[in-house]
Amino acid sequence: MSDEGFGGSSPPDDYRRRLHDAAMKAAKEAVASGLAGRDAHLMQAVKALDDLNEAFNVLSERLAEWYMVLCPGHQMRPVELIDFILKEGLPEEDSVIKGLASTAKALNDERKALEGYIKAAMEEIAPNLSNVAGPILGARLIARAGGLEKLAKMPASSIQVMGAGEALFKHLKAGTPPPKHGLIYKHPLVKGASKKARGKISRMLASKAAIAARVDFYSGETVDLGDLKEKAAAIKAKGRKKHECR
Amino acid sequence: MSDEGFGGSSPPDDYRRRLHDAAMKAAKEAVASGLAGRDAHLMQAVKALDDLNEAFNVLSERLAEWYMVLCPGHQMRPVELIDFILKEGLPEEDSVIKGLASTAKALNDERKALEGYIKAAMEEIAPNLSNVAGPILGARLIARAGGLEKLAKMPASSIQVMGAGEALFKHLKAGTPPPKHGLIYKHPLVKGASKKARGKISRMLASKAAIAARVDFYSGETVDLGDLKEKAAAIKAKGRKKHECR
């Protein structure tokens, strides 16, 4: 038996050490490539935007409830109330409530700044996807997929239901109807459509988004994917026509 | 039949109208008295503090994850990282990450400001309870009870387990051992004690807190409730002695 085999006691140790080294190297490279891409910052920005949205909602609701102590039954909306408190001041506990209002305002301003950053980054990283889905939804799709490369390798049908995890699980387990849309539901063309047309419009959008992501990742050029509004209108009209014929 | 009875069609209408007016008046007064107390602001401040804690934790964790993209494996703690980013700057995406860091810093500063407000308010509204439980835990007890008056009317045993809702429910439904402490667990004398002594120390603290809340609400004077540290030490020593005798 050669030294490279498993005969003695030393070669297996050596083999294990080399296996361990190779596995560690592969793992480190995988982590590094996952983190190093230009889209890594974009993904963090999308998650941070969600965190900021949540924090702003909680704090502005708290502020509205606190303001109720001073003025029961007020009807101001969160952003209005924050501006009002910062401008007008309050008869009681002025400084502490104002402090909370300016913290909520800081969250709102940072939210807007992050949206601006995401729009600019999408323009650079994935302009075609940004055109199809809008910059924020496009960035959400990239973040959910785990990067632009992974999104570019996904079939359109996966993009269509990405983010509808629970409904998909129910479909597979309990046989409920499959979900028609996940994240893509947020697209104004889907959200604004009748319940009947939504499934078809989200399939159309998902297939365009899949093409856009591939062009963005592999070539970086700009492609013309047609007028999506027109296509959605055609799908809606077709649905209505069928209905009339019956 | 007189006009005041139920003979015609008009008196019942009048009766209903007056009943409605009286009920509305009583409801409005109840809402107003619930909101108008000096402790109403304190309760809102405690809830706001919890909201701020949660938001700060989420944002600072997000920042740590984002910073990992630039420097995998860093070991800085949240507040350290925020200071570092704001001071040193970053090689990439500087302005957007700095913006998030300064938003997280604003949350942290506001948290400290609210704690200061709560301490000052407790000194004014419930100085005895503040002495027994500390200002923040004391304010939490008031907030959970729904006001200083309600806390003052609670038996000590309720104060002891207030905030242990789920464990109490399990005890009543499934016969598990009753909870020994709820919110009061956060008191350093309970938290620092052995598992065996915790139940007794929290009962002692709850009874002192009940007395303190009553004095604060009904007289506003300062009472001497003894040295709590000494009492807790005596409970611990008794527990150890018993153990040695066996």
Image (cartoon, coloured by chain):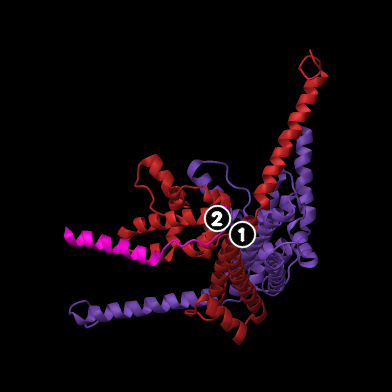
Chain colours: A purple, B red
Q: How many marks?
A: 2
- The image shows residue B151 at horizontal and vertical percentages of 53, 51
Q: Is residue A43 left or right of residue B180?
A: right
State whether residue B78 is above or below residue A129: below
Within the magenta stretch, is there residue B244?
yes
Q: Is residue B8 magenta?
A: no
Who is closer to the viewer here, A106 or A145? A106
The C terminus of chain B lies in quadrant:
bottom left
- Vertical position of residue A145 compared to residue A235: above or below: below
Label 2 resides on the chain identified as B
Same-subunit check for callouts 2 and 1: yes
What is the x, y in percent for residue B24?
73, 37
Residue displayed at 72% across by 45% down: A197
Q: Secondary structure at mark 2?
A: helix
Tell me if label 2 and label 1 are in contact, CB under 8 Å: yes
Q: Which residue is mark 1?
A: B42
Q: Which residue is mark 2?
A: B142
Q: Residue drawn at (36%, 66%), measured in percent from left and top?
A: B230
x and y, in percent, of residue B158 in the image = 45, 48
Residue beneath the point at 64% across and 81% down: B94
Badge 2 crowding class, 10 Å Cα cut-off, few under 14, some 14 to 19, many 20 or more, is: many
Q: Nearer the viewer, residue B6 or A163?
A: B6
Determine the chain carrying the residue at label 1: B
**In the rendered structure, which amino acid carries the disc numbered 2?**
Ile
Dominant secondary structure, magenta: helix
Q: Residue furthest bottom?
A: B88
Range of residues picked out in magenta:
B218-246
